[in-house]
Amino acid sequence: MSATTSARPDETLRPGRIDAKPVRHPWRWVAVAVIAVVVAMMVSSFLTNPRWDFSYAFQIMQQTPVIRGLWIGTIGGTIGSMILGVVLGVVLAVMRLSDNPVLRFVAFVYTWFFRAIPRYVLLGLIGVGIGFLYSRLTIGVPFGEQIATAVGIDRDTFTFFGLDWNAFSSTIWAGILGLGLSEAAYMAEIARAGIQSVDRGQTEAAQALGMPPGKTMRRIVLPQAMRVIVPPTGNETIAMVKDTSLLIAIPITNELFFQAYGFGQRSFKIMPGFVAATLWYLIVCSILMVGQHYLERYFGRGFGAPSKKAQQQLSKIEADH
Amino acid sequence: MTTATRPAEAPLVHAVNVMKSFHGNEVLKGIDLDVRRGEVVVLLGPSGSGKTTFLRCINQLETIDGGRIWVDGDLMGYADKGGQLYRLTDKQIAAQRRDIGMCFQRFNLFPHKTALENVMEAPVQVKGVKKKDARKRGIELLERVGLGDKPAAYPAQLSGGQQQRVAIARALAMDPKLMLFDEPTSALDPELVGEVLAVMRELAASGMTMIVVTHEMGFARDVADEVVFMDGGVVVEQGPPSEVIGNPRHPRTKDFLRRMRAEEEEQAEAVAAALSVVQANIAGTGDEAGDAKATDPAAPADATPATTPSEPPAERSGD
């Protein structure tokens, strides 16, 4: 430090542009070589082993049942169960943080139960188990049917709503219900972390302005919590795309993997079936990752570095000023 | 002070025997305070004296354990039905807070909303004002606090002083009868304090009733109608600034003011010391500059009282 300062008076001795040798990274070249060999092996397998049969995999990808399975089972199932999961999850998180001990306890028990049940088991339970207990699900006065029978009137007198469970459980709605209920338990924890990450001063500021608690949560706390909630929710969504392959436990056959695998199996070409499903999952998840990026940017507004648009607006304002 | 349980010719704020404990720790031990309309009251006192807690009790951000607080004739937080108090619901308390504006030490602007959106939020969401009208009023208020050119800026893009001024505009948007300021300049860099105080002076001059917790003695001296000195959860001394600040009677007030003055002087000394080092650095050339660097570590040692202002006064209080 002092050497440079003392060197200052003599113009000719002042150091000029830096022209230094960069640090060498020999291990990077080793890694590149290893990867090149592995890739070459894979390409060799693709070219020499006829069982890959990529053209047949592409054919499977375009089959109507596979496409229908993709839209209804995979995409429809993901969207439906994530909507149910997020809405129910936020409600559970708010319950968990409420002053009401009953609500807190209910939310805790829900989260505990649905986090402990594997999704495959839960889906089987919903699809097969409940149908075994009740072929027809009805909501009405407790013991209504027994009372009605005893009195001797129509046994559905005290029933307000009925659902044929066996018919319901073969539709995608049963899958959405099962996956959504399970997802809500995870989303509740994510939403709770998000809500708790918002500074207490924000609630106080809203309170001081006379905002009632519900509005404070909706207008002030939740939008800020979204910044913390969105990234893990994106991961959950991508995981859900893959978990729709469990819908066969219900069983729902209108689903991507079951259909693609079925095509491979029926023609004794197992691998093309797997490849077809894998490629579709890759495509859907890639699109979701792009969407996640834009969502994160939207909910991150006002935090960290301002967006380009905001910067332009600001510099314009400052130029006018 | 105990003349009326419910005031007839009521002052705007009428607090009687306010008590508050946190986990058995008594923070307020029976505070009485009357604030008339248009009056500016400054609460002074060392940290931990309970002044911020008392301020937060007025708009029910803290519930009180004893005593009563009326604002404009409304008993805060409770309904009195024939001597029996009933706790109000959160919604009813929210309604009571509408007419009381508050500014926080850490501003607490909504970071996901622009300056203008911050100001518009409460009138639109709480009072149901039309967005168009709220926007017009919001721009007027931002102009009033000197930020008419920054409606689209997010809080993170504003300086501390600018954020606090937006926070004042946000509170004013609800047309409050009373404004509470909780150390509004304590979190600010020294050069930004002035702009916030200027807005508060203008507000006081316009006739707003204000209760201000602050350490800015100049503001208290010039603007306050009444200065209340609190220590240990009680009001030690109160009166016009000329008396409480100019001619304090109670030893604790004297001690506090002496410490505040000493702090200011020490800060000034530290600034002067730092300046002289910087000047020496600038003046020094060649090898002399190296000498100035050698003295550099010594300079902050001289200035330590400024970096830890709370310690030397503690020694002094022992005198």
Image (cartoon, coloured by chain):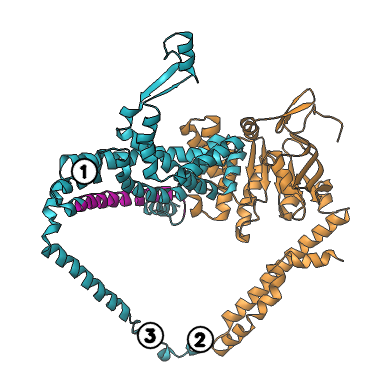
Chain colours: A cyan, B orange
Q: Secondary structure at mark 3?
A: loop
**In the image, is residue A80 above or below residue B292?**
above
Question: At 55% across and 30% down in the image, what residue appears?
Answer: B127
- In this view, A66 is above or below B189: above
Q: Pointers 1 and 2 in contact (CB under 8 A)? A: no
Task: Give the alpha-carbon distance from disc 3 to disc 2, as whole Å.
Answer: 15 Å
The three-letter code of the residue at mark 2 reads Thr
Respond whether the residues carrying marks 1 and 2 are from the same subunit.
yes
| Residue A55 appears left or right of A224 | left
Nearer the viewer's eye, disc 1 or disc 2?
1
* Amino acid type at image mark 1: Gln
Pick whichever of labels 1 and 2 is earlier in the sequence: 2
Would residue B233 be counted in the magenta stretch? no
Q: Which residues are magenta?
A: A274-303
Secondary structure under tag 2 reads helix
User: CB atoms at circles 1 and 3 under 8 Å apart?
Assistant: no
Measured as percent of width and height from the top left, residue A211 is found at 57, 35
Residue A291 within the magenta-colored segment of the rendering: yes
* C-alpha gap between disc 1 and disc 2: 75 Å
Compared to A54, does B267 lie above or below?
below
Q: Earlier in the sequence, mark 3 or mark 2?
A: 2
Q: Position of residue B145 (x, y in %)?
A: 57, 46
Instruction: Name the chain letter of the residue that bears numbered label 3.
Output: A
Of B151 and A193, the residue lying toward us: A193
Q: Give the labeled residue for mark 1.
A: A259
Please identify the quadrant where the N terminus of chain B is shown. top right
**Residue under label 3:** A16
At label 3, the amino acid type is: Gly
- Of the numbered discs 1 and 3, the one sitting upstream in the chain is 3
| Disc 1 and disc 3 on one polypeptide chain | yes
Q: What residue did someone put label 2 on?
A: A5
Left or right: residue B267 compared with residue A274: right
